[in-house]
Image (cartoon, rainbow, N blue to C red):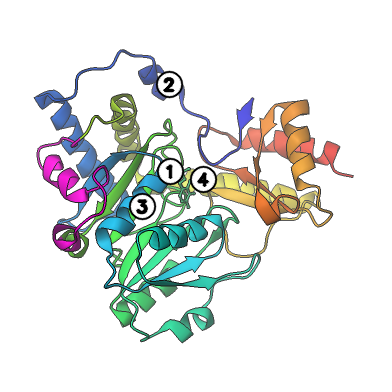
């Protein structure tokens, strides 16, 4: 079975090997040293400002989304949520759960987020913007320039779920004035699922310090304090941290630009092949992380099943309303261009 999913994804052999090793105890100076190195390299990956801090959570990506909301926002805030799919919707759900006042910008499927949609929300008392920069459920990549400018003009705290865009598309925390970046282990980092990350700048850390947090496990004050010495308040997923250490060394050696370029090449190669073969690709702005294919006849899920069962090719199906019309092909993880020849050829065999 080959994965063209968006997490977990195909992992490299050297990373898988680390997963087979016995685990060390982690309350040691040696482990702390690894953690501090990870913080430094992670900050480079997102180009974080010098005062930014890394929090490592043992939780899936949603855990970091929840931690961001319940530590950075309070009932005094008014959040604006871009709800362009299931992940945007999740932010709204989390705000609701923690009684954070919020409004959503609902983006119907297929519609591109533009300045016109943001305009009515300018100078309306909002204090924060929550966005999944790449809305993975549709494959739309929002315009970070547009969102960054809007936050700056309105003085909003800019909270970005970059889980599925980081390392796939260019990203720059400092240049875009992002206050908190959320990501996770199983997407472009191509590690086992189980870790999620928050990188918070000075303004965000100030908020964390003064906000009463209605969670024990997700109280970031504890994480930031512990991380000063390279530790976590609770037992972390030690094995994935060792995989992360290795992966960050490789990314740092290759250069972040090089990793993004790899993803871009796969996405372009596959999209060009689709076009030559009459396979419809969604037309809105897209991340290099995946290609959303459109099936106007409503047979997307059936194609997914056939690709999986006949050919061992695991594409990424959509749930809910889009189950019949959208099928996503992932570009993250240990894949090569020839893998996409196979996907296109098999799709051609299946499609009427
Ligand atoms: C994958 C993903 C998440 C996290 O999902 P989990 O299943 O909780 O790891 C959150 N936001 C986006 C945009 C994602 O792609």
How far is disc 1 from disc 4 in space, using C-alphas? 7 Å
CB under 8 Å between callouts 3 and 4?
Answer: no
Instruction: Describe the element under mark 4 as helix, strand or loop.
Output: helix
The disc label shown at residue 66, or none = 3
Q: Which residues are magenta?
A: 206-233
Residue drawn where x is 22% and y is 48% of the image:
219
Which residue, given by chain and number where applicable, does mark 2 sit on? 16
- Of residues 322 and 29, the one drawn nearer to the viewer in this rendering: 322
Is 223 magenta? The answer is: yes
CB under 8 Å between callouts 1 and 4?
Answer: yes
CB under 8 Å between callouts 4 and 2?
Answer: no
Front label number (1 vs 2): 2
Front label number (2 vs 3): 3
Q: Position of residue 285 (x, y in %)?
A: 58, 64
Q: Crowding at label 2, few (<14), some or many (≥20) Cα neighbours within 10 Å?
A: some
CB under 8 Å between callouts 2 and 3?
Answer: no
Front label number (4 vs 2): 2
The disc label shown at residue 259, or none = 1
- Mark 4 vs 2, N-terminal side: 2
How far is disc 1 from disc 2 in space, using C-alphas? 19 Å
Q: Crowding at label 1, few (<14), some or many (≥20) Cα neighbours within 10 Å?
A: some
CB under 8 Å between callouts 1 and 3?
Answer: no
Q: Is residue 162 left or right of residue 109?
A: left
Q: Position of residue 178 (x, y in %)?
A: 30, 64
How many badges with numbers are in the image?
4
Kindly tell me whether mark 2's CB lies below 8 Å from ligand 1. no
Q: Crowding at label 3, few (<14), some or many (≥20) Cα neighbours within 10 Å?
A: many
């Amino acid at each position: 079975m080959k994965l063209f999913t968006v997490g977990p994804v195909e992992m490299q052999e050297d990373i898988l090997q680390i997963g087979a090793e016995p685990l060390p105890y982690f309350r040691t100076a040696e482990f702390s040293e690894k953690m501090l190195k990870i913080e430094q390299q992670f900050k480079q990956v997102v180009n974080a400002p010098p005062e930014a801090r890394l929090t490592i959570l043992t939780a899936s990506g949603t855990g970091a989304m929840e931690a961001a909301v319940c530590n950075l926002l309070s009932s005094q805030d008014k959040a604006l949520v871009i709800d362009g799919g299931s992940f945007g919707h999740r932010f709204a759900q989390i705000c609701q759960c923690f009684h954070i006042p919020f409004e959503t910008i609902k983006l119907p499927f297929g519609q591109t987020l533009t300045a016109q949609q943001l305009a009515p929300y300018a100078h309306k008392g909002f204090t924060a913007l929550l966005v999944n920069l790449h809305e993975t459920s549709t494959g739309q990549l929002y315009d970070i320039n547009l969102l960054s400018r809007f936050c700056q003009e309105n003085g909003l705290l800019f909270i970005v779920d970059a889980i599925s865009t980081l390392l796939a598309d260019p990203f720059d925390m400092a240049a875009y004035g992002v206050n908190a970046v959320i990501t996770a282990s199983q997407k472009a980092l191509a590690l086992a699922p189980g870790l999620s990350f928050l990188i918070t700048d000075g303004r965000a850390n100030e908020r964390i310090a003064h906000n009463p947090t209605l969670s024990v496990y997700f109280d970031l004050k504890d994480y930031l304090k512990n991380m000063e010495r390279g530790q976590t308040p609770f037992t972390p997923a030690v094995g994935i941290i060792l995989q992360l250490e290795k992966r960050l060394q490789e990314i740092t050696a290759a250069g972040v630009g090089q990793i993004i370029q790899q993803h871009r090449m796969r996405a372009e190669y596959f999209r060009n092949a689709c076009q030559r073969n009459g396979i419809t690709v969604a037309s809105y702005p897209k991340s290099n992380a995946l290609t959303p294919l459109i099936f106007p006849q409503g047979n997307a899920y059936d194609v997914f099943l056939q690709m999986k069962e006949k050919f061992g090719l695991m594409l990424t199906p959509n749930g809910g309303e889009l189950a019949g019309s959208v099928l996503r092909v992932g570009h993250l993880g240990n894949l090569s261009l020839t893998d996409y020849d196979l996907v296109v050829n098999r799709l051609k065999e299946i499609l009427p």
